[in-house]
């Protein structure tokens, strides 16, 4: 491949992020679609459709990152609620 030909699409990172978002964070709402988009990106890359692969990988990465961010915010809010409730009961 020629340098700059567009074949350097990273489809592994979106797949890993989707799996982590789904399995470790328990975010099935955005994690499963992230995995699906990552697999579609891998398939597009394997047939040589690099622009479609790049777009699908970007969507997969965004879905996984947003999903993990929402889980972090939810856990932080839950910890804050528990801390406030514990302080109020004393």
Image: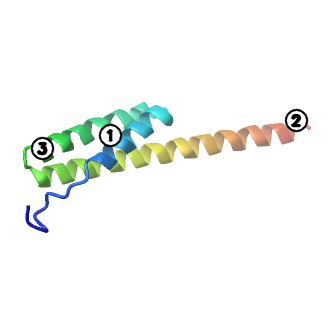
Query: Which residue lies under the disc numbered 3?
Result: 46
Question: Where is 54 relative to 43, above or below?
Answer: below
Q: In this rendered view, identify the residue nearer to me: 59 or 7.
A: 7
What is the number of the mark on residue 89?
2
Residue placed farthest to the front in the image? Answer: 1
Q: Quadrant of residue 63?
A: top left
Q: Secondary structure at mark 3?
A: helix
Instruction: Where is residue 62? Give x, y as percent.
Output: 35, 50
Query: Which residue lies under the disc numbered 1?
Result: 34
Q: Is residue 57 visible?
A: yes
What residue sits 71% from the left and 44% below the top? Answer: 80
What residue sits 20% from the left and 44% below the top? Answer: 41
Q: In this rendered view, identify the residue nearer to me: 60 or 4.
A: 4
Of the residues tagged 3 and 2, which is closer to the observer?
Answer: 3
Which quarter of the figure is the N terminus placed in? Answer: bottom left
Counting residues from the start of the chain, the first of labels 2 and 1 encountered is 1
Which color mode does the image show?
rainbow
Q: Quadrant of residue 81?
A: top right
Of the residues tagged 2 and 1, which is closer to the observer?
Answer: 1
């Amino acid at each position: 491949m020629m340098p700059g030909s567009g074949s350097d699409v990273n489809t592994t990172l979106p797949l890993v992020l989707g799996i982590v978002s789904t399995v470790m964070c328990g975010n099935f709402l955005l994690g499963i679609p992230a995995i699906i988009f990552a697999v579609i990106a891998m398939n597009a890359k394997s047939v040589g459709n690099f622009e479609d692969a790049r777009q699908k990988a970007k969507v997969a990465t965004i879905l996984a990152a947003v999903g993990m961010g929402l889980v972090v915010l939810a856990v932080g809010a839950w910890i804050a609620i528990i801390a406030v409730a514990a302080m109020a009961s004393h």
